Image (cartoon, grey):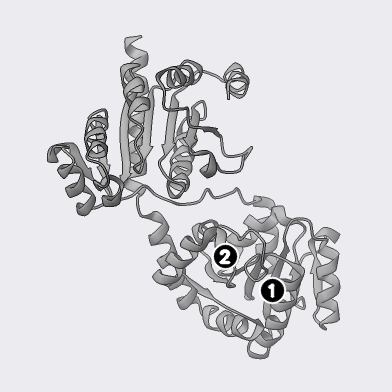
Amino acid sequence: MEENAKSVLSHRTSGPILWLHAGEASDIAALNYLAHRLLQIDNSALIVMTSQPSDLPSPSEDSGVHNVEVPEESGTSVRHFLNIWTPHTLIWAGGKLRPTMLRVATNSGVKMILANSKATDFKPKGFRLLPDVTRKSLRFFSEIYAIDELAANQLNRMGVAANRIKLKGALQSAAVMPNAPQALTEELLSTLTGRTLWLAASVSTHEAKVALEAHQLVMQRDHRSLLLLVPCKGIDRQIFVQLAGAAGLRVACGAEGNLPDAMTQVYVADSYETLSACYRLSPVAFLGQSMDEETKSLDPFVPAAFGCALLYGPNVSLYKERYSLLSKEGGARMIRNAETLAQAVNHMSNPAQSAKMALASWEMISEGAELTDTLVETVLAHYDALRRTS
């Protein structure tokens, strides 16, 4: 941790230093998005996130968040962490409070905020000592946000005064939208006027075969339909070109400098990096890596943020909760084979239907935006106040 911190701190400009802690793995996505919102406003910010070793997310060069293992529950370990990173604010999401860490951080002048508090986070159980320690730990927070009234009532029973508890729901668990290549988007858009199109996103070879078979069925109903096919990382796009040709479909490939024309039935994208442009263009998207076992599924919140109505297969374990939520709200639908995929594409290609599904998804992923924005403003205001008094 120390070498990583020194390397990071030696290359940074002055700016707010925020410490995020995820009580559970389920809190990490919301904290990552909060970090993204802060970095959008102030890209000089430094953000360090701690969590249990088993919950640490895979490193990402683009996230701007430095994920490190939580310090040991000892005064020496916590002070060492604080001396290295020098955060001015800690936002703790969820439960599993660490009394020593919170006490030492408070005594060091770190502003403490509790968010994403659920009723189950502080439910007394086991020895009576546990609730007493938790009660004392809750006093360290200057601001406490409960996700609902049940959580607020539980916090109140744990000794938090009702006027200290704010009800603003859960933090927003949206996904960061990647930038869509503007030039490519405009080039493709200029060739697609009047065409019905759908996307097979980041698909494996098996999933490409399913999508191509489904597209043949779709064209029986709409002969002007166009399938955008984006291979997942590591797959040669020429394999998809050959598969489309073998299926008797007229294909164009972006890697060869081609754009779809009026006769094109399948367009194989240049590379995986063009996926965001395809999301922006496609009202309907079948998300790959969802029909093959032992593959990492795609985060559905990304295409949902682009306004896509979503289709997916049964193997989405990595983001199972997100897919389930989107499906429950009417923004996504599971398919199992080429026939059900074709039926769903035909149904969702109706502009009114795809717009209805996209709106349902957008409303769901937008929940919690108010709290996320509030916390970003709080972090920046506290940092500005510290600068004025230093």
Whole-percent x and y of residue 265?
74, 77
Residue 329 seen in this snapshot: yes
Image location of residue 114, percent across then percent down: 31, 37
Kind of residue at badge 1? Leu
Q: Name which of mark 1 and mark 2 comes first in the sequence.
A: 1
* Depth check, front residue: 25 or 179: 25
Point out the image quarter for the C terminus. Answer: top left
Q: Is residue 180 left or right of residue 170?
A: right
| Quarter of the rendering containing residue 193 | bottom right
Q: Residue at x 52, y 48 (%)?
A: 176
Q: Amino acid at mark 2?
A: Val
The residue at the far bottom in this view is 220
Q: Is residue 152 above or below residue 6?
A: below
The image quadrant that residue 264 belongs to is bottom right
Q: Residues within 10 Å of mark 1 (few under 14, many from 20)?
A: many
Q: Nearer the viewer, residue 76 or 304?
A: 76
Residue occupying image coordinates x 25% and y 38%: 144
Instruction: Report, in whole angstroms, how far the alpha carbon at label 1 lies from the one at label 2.
Output: 23 Å
Q: Position of residue 318 (x, y in %)?
A: 56, 58
Q: Which dot marks residue 316? A: 2
Q: Which residue is mark 1?
A: 227
